[in-house]
Image (cartoon, rainbow, N blue to C red):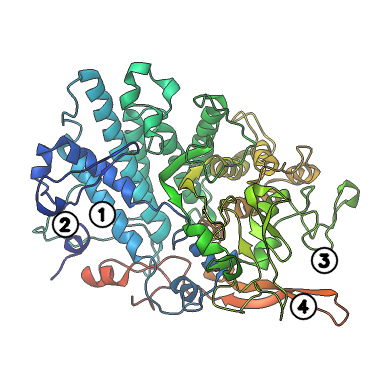
Amino acid sequence: MKKLEIKIFYFIAILFIAVFTACVDLDPSPNNEISDEELWKYPDAVQGLIGGCYDLLSRSYDDNEGAYLDCATDNAVKTSTNDPVLLFSKGVLAADPFKTYWERDYRAIRMVNLFLEDRKGINTRFLVNERWDSITRNRLQGEAFGLRAWFQWDLLQKFGGKSVNGDFLGYPIITRVLSSNENIVLRRNTYEECVKQIIADCDSAFAYLPLANRDYLFSEGDRPYAGSKYHGRIDGISVKALKALVYLRWASPRFNPSNEISRWDSAAVNAKYVMDFKMSSKYDGRAFYPTNRVNWQDPNDPSIIFRSRFDASSQSMEKAFYPEGFLGNGVMGATQNLVDAFGMRDGFPIDYNGNNNKQTTKYDDTKPYLNRDPRFYSIIFYHGSTANKDNVSSNVMYTFDCTNGTGQDVANLNTNNSRTNYYIKKFLYMGMNFSDKSVLRQPRCKIFIRWSHICLAFAEAANQVVGPLDESRYGMSAKQALAYIRSCKTYDGANGISTADPYLNDVALLGKLVFNELVKNETRIETCFEGTRFFDLNRWTTTTDEMNGEIYGMEIQTGLYGQTKLNPRMLVEERNLRTSYIPIPYSEILTSNNQLLQNEGAEYWKY
């Protein structure tokens, strides 16, 4: 019988010396392949075990664990009606769009296990200079633990859930190197066991790692082997942030039915540790401002906590998200459901019916894009909006026209137009125009954890422990953390919601439950198209039905006398998820002789 570990763990290591400052070509044997036993003869290859893990991480949002996963939620719609993620959201059997992540994560885990086993990695001599060698060995040992925690966290978030036997299960925990001749059939560990393993690896990583990969923390003589040269790799702050996210998920309603407050408290404590560091640290000559939003084109933006390697001149997201009329592929569009989640310029929701004396702007359904939350304009393109070169309003590259019958960007006109009449702006470099004689590009990366994620985590967790206004326990209130998010400058550099924010003040006075709903909405707005909405809905809800519903776009028609008629309830599709969880790859279940239990509701999954 073919065992699970043979399929996903045993391989001849193909090693990439993956560092952020340079790439080293390693070819100790034909085809750049060396065995597990031989690699210890080559210190660069040993480093490659760690570097290769970073190389496995996605560098962009245009994939099935990034923006496309939002198309299984109420945030977005995929243009192709045959897309596997879309079919998954409809409960239809399709090619598995998630299996590759299961395989990737276990490949990375095996690489770090090889480094960690018998302390071979940390006992490898990398440099002649003893001090620099010690810095390098400890950093790599910490990164190994941190990366194992990261890839285990990815497995837990993606595949962890209630199994067909009713138990909450995670993934098979593997902390050693498995060989091809071992007769082992792996089973999923309990959810709690997986959480504890990830936390333990985070703590082990923190013991070895520098607090942050920033130059000011190291002497000038040590900077060739420490500091900002390694920005983008796991460091102490990133594992603290990871702990906050792990605890937050474990504390959430689906995984915490008895509402154990200690889990929320651990999430808040770790998030606050990260926030304190960010707000009190130097950034090598660049100031960090808690109300500045991340710059997607700057891989060294101070608000980044953990990121991928960066691509020097990528254009994939512009190609993916622009419509055909602007030489893009229009692979997905934002929903009206998401657009309605953005409030007004003064911070009030569009359907607010409370004390109108506090409102300065009110929603007009005949002019639905007027005076909206400033963040809206930097995240979504809508009918009549413009793509402006370098965000200069007088330098218009393209105007979006989604009018039925005449507009070149209208839904269903062709296979490269959004089906909702909305397009994605959030990640795009506004200096790029495919019509230019010389097309400009910018280096960028995928940001896995950033300042905003941790502010939101703290606000959600602290509110559950002490409510919205209490500052005494953590030195900051949940309301203050959420105020950072709402007052942030937009991705286009415009001012956010005023710090006066009467709506935030009113909600904070109404207590935990009402404030929690605001945190959820802010999380939705802030993290849209980053691939986190599915997992947030998963942890906030307790049934699959709560994740389903009708998905709308905006229909734009021209009336008999030239007036514009709007229909914000243009039904595009319906979410009909049959499971709240991503299914365990069916091939792995077969390989395990059905010992690897499938997730609840995914019994139909045969891919």
Mark 4 residue type: Gln
Q: Secondary structure at mark 1?
A: helix
Q: Which residue is mark 4?
A: 557
Precedes in sequence: disc 1 or disc 3: 1
Q: Give the vertical position of 322 relative to 304 (above or below).
A: below
- Give coordinates of residue 279: x percent, y percent: 57, 28
Precedes in sequence: disc 4 or disc 2: 2
Residue for point 19% across, 47% down: 176
Task: Indicate left or right for 76 with 115 as reference.
Answer: right
Using a 10 Å C-alpha cutoff, classify the residue at mark 1 as few (fewer than 14 neighbours), some (14 to 19) or many (20 or more): many
Q: Quadrant of residue 366?
A: bottom right
Most foreground residue, 532 or 468? 532
- Residue that extends furthest to the right in the rendered view of this protein: 357
Q: Which residue is mark 1?
A: 107
Q: Are marks 1 and 2 in contact (CB under 8 Å)?
A: yes
Please tell me the numbered disc located at residue 11: 2
Using a 10 Å C-alpha cutoff, classify the residue at mark 4 as few (fewer than 14 neighbours), some (14 to 19) or many (20 or more): some
Q: Secondary structure at mark 4?
A: strand
- Alpha carbon distance from label 1 to label 3: 51 Å
Please tell me the numbered disc located at residue 365: 3
- Alpha carbon distance from label 3 to label 2: 59 Å
- Alpha carbon distance from label 4 to label 2: 58 Å
Precedes in sequence: disc 1 or disc 2: 2
